Image: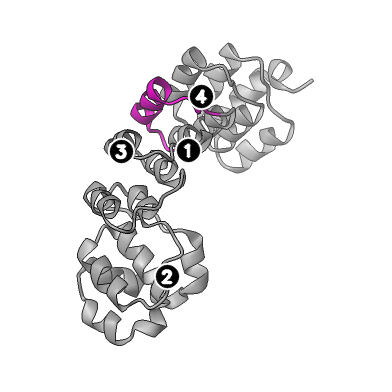
Amino acid sequence: MAIYIHKKYKRKIGKYLYSLLELIRNNKLSYILVNYDQFYNSEAIELCCKLGNLYAFKLLIDKNKERIRFYPISYAASNGHLYMIRWLHKNRYKRGTTNAMDWAAKNGHLKTIIWLHKNRSEGCTKYAMDWAASNGHLDVIIWLHKNRSEGCSFHAMDLAARHGHLDIIIWLHKNRTEGCTSDAIDSAAYNGHLKTIIWLHKNTSFRCSYYIFEKTKENGYIKVYNYLIKHKNELLKN
């Protein structure tokens, strides 16, 4: 399973990051406990939450002498570790933020989102639907639309276009009012998503920028380039 790792770990732990991941993933905790200081204890505990390793988490919090300054539930939610979230919720590590539902939505963990909605009060932000759109999680978007009031921003459709999620673009167009910007066609063209470009061209009033013509050619998307040239007068911004 792919694990979402915040870029700050790469800055702070560096060469220890991936070895630490493997140690926690495989419950090889004796080495971590003996060599605890070199693993930046708070980061080691955060990684336990991201990996959903509750056993390792319990051992390391006993070793940790500092107050935990992060929100374990949010990190566990980012990778959908619902059993760990339930444990944290019942025990003294129940503090949380909107990051929990936002990150769960980003990575498509709908069961986690539903549990947080029913059992927690932090809620989410517009980022939840925006990030779900970016990563192609239509089921999450539909659920958030029906059950939450935060909505999304124009970034949702822009990001869906960037990654070629045409089904999400069509759904957002039919069910939401935020729309998109000219970045939608530009980013879709830059990444070679011809079907997305054609749909946006026919169904929205937004157009593309001059620079994207040569960029699509440079990137090797000849079919996209030819389409843009053919409809150049219609697609260029005023």
Name the spot of residue 230 as percent of width and height, x first: 65, 19
Q: CA distance from mark 1 to mark 3?
A: 22 Å
Counting residues from the N terminus, which is met first, the one under dot 3 or under dot 4?
A: 3
Tag of residue 67: 2
Question: What residue sits right under mark 1 in the picture?
Answer: 131
The quarter of the image holding the C terminus is: top right
- Residue assigned mark 3: 119
**Label whose residue precedes the other's in the sequence (4 or 2):** 2
Q: Secondary structure at mark 3?
A: helix
Name the residue nearer the viewer: 12 or 203. Answer: 12
Relative image position of residue 23 (x, y in whole percent): 26, 73
Callout 2: helix, strand or loop? loop
> Along the line of sight, which residue is nearer the eye, 110 or 156?
110
Compare residues 25 and 65 and report the one nearer the observer: 65
Which label sits in the foreground, 4 or 1? Answer: 1
Local SS, label 4 = helix
